[in-house]
Image: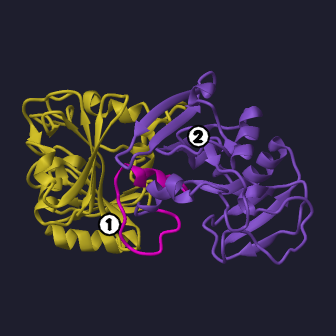
Chain colours: A purple, B yellow
């Protein structure tokens, strides 16, 4: 089977925003409360950042446990790595993801300001100044036959959609409005010319939007 | 995380039957048309028996691709292996599952008539005359830290439920009535004393029933 480029567990507000306005070191989601977007996932048994036993094993858990299934690499935009803009002032800061990042694969960070690769636990971060096509080729090679996750944020997802490189998307629409910030879409219907769409409401209040190529 | 015993992609009719009446070599599901029960799964990209490219990647696909996720062994009843009853007349027949069985792990077949183990491709069938507790211990050991799938059929699922050994169940209820055969339940509510339940309708017409322990 061919390698897919998959968006997994990407959370947006009911009005289409993936993050709020004013990203900073202290507020990766800007003015938005990230809990409002991702609490559905945090409640599940398979949530990637879960540190204590327990958690639900219903519908939402299928999505969180699929997050890493058959994924061999991730591509992310620079803003998912950190809030810095422009040339790096300091290589000692190693991203928002802690000493044990939840990726467990190579991660390719798209940036116009590359810096040396480094490894934290079983995640290696590489920094690429590359087009989506070039980045995807690198990530597929690193994934060694497995799929590649397109991790976001919004601008990165939109860039790869514009290049028509995305095979499947799972977008979790949370029951909250953000009013401003980084917008993924005005409406999910914008993708219907190229993708099938199933909308699956969850008891948690999110509506899972599942897209795959026509 | 502890090893779970999971029922995965187990299909029943709207009136609660997992197979029809009169199992035979030619009709593993007796009078029931298996397509009516399992066609939702066969349409997906990740269906375990898929031989051609294509298939849907919506909700139903999450269930078929989870079928083998983190599974290290399967337990099945004898009737899922073959239609024979009583002592084996013939060891040359090696089950309904072909030269490349879709399990890819050790499989423990419960029977009062054990026979020698054998291997087909990457699946090894073992035959156990054992209680559910004993069989689960053997399967967990073979699964080497991964979960164990309880593959059915109905009588086997009921036996392990009666012994309170099942951690999660995914039961796909198909929009068809069978009227007679092997009955899993009168109603899914029978399990509510011990399990949470989410019912998730799929566009394919099946209703996925997701149970996990309270």
For label 1, the residue is: B4
Q: Does mark 1 fall on the same chain as mark 2?
A: no
Stretch in magenta: A47-68
Q: Nearer the viewer, residue A167 or B123?
A: A167
Is B91 rendered above or below residue A95? Answer: above
Is B44 rendered above or below residue A97? Answer: above
> Is B156 part of what is drawn in magenta?
no
Identify the secondary structure beneath mark 1. Answer: loop
**Residue A65 can be seen, yes or no:** no
Q: Is residue A94 left or right of residue B156?
A: right
In the rendered picture of this protein, how many numbered marks are placed on residues? 2
Identify the secondary structure beneath mark 2. Answer: strand
Say if mark 2 contacts mark 1, CB within 8 Å.
no
In percent of width and height, residue A38 lies at 51, 55
Q: Chain of mark 1?
A: B
The residue that appears at 12% across and 66% down in the rendered structure is: B163
Circle 1 packing at 10 Å, graded few (<14), some (14-19), many (20+), is some
The residue that appears at 81% across and 41% down in the rendered structure is: A133
**Residue A77 can be seen, yes or no:** yes
Location of residue B148 (image quadrant): bottom left
For label 2, the residue is: A169
In percent of width and height, residue B47 lies at 43, 39
Circle 2 packing at 10 Å, graded few (<14), some (14-19), many (20+), is many
Q: Quadrant of the N terminus of chain B?
A: bottom left
The residue that appears at 63% across and 75% down in the rendered structure is: A100
Q: Chain of mark 2?
A: A
> Is A62 part of what is drawn in magenta?
yes
Cα gap from disc 2 to disc 1, whole angstroms: 29 Å
In percent of width and height, residue A7 lies at 61, 45
């Amino acid at each position: 089977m061919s390698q897919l480029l998959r968006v997994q567990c990407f959370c947006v507000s009911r009005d289409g925003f993936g993050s709020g306005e004013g990203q900073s070191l202290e507020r990766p989601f800007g003015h938005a409360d990230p809990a409002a977007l991702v609490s559905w996932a945090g409640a599940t048994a398979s949530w990637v950042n879960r540190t204590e036993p327990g958690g639900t094993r219903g519908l939402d858990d299928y999505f969180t446990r699929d997050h890493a299934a058959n994924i061999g690499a991730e591509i992310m935009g620079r803003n998912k790595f950190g809030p810095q803009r422009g040339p790096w002032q300091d290589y000692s800061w190693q991203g928002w993801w802690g000493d044990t990042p939840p990726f467990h694969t190579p991660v390719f960070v798209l940036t116009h300001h590359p810096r040396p690769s480094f490894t934290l636990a079983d995640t290696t971060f590489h920094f690429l100044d590359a087009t989506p096509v070039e980045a995807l080729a690198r990530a597929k090679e690193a994934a060694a036959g497995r799929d590649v996750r397109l991790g976001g944020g919004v601008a990165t997802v939109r860039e790869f959609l514009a290049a028509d490189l995305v095979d499947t998307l799972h977008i979790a629409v949370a029951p909250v409005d953000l009013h401003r910030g980084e917008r993924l879409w005005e409406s999910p219907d914008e993708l219907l010319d190229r993708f099938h769409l199933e909308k699956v409401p969850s008891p948690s209040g999110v509506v899972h939007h599942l897209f795959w190529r026509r």
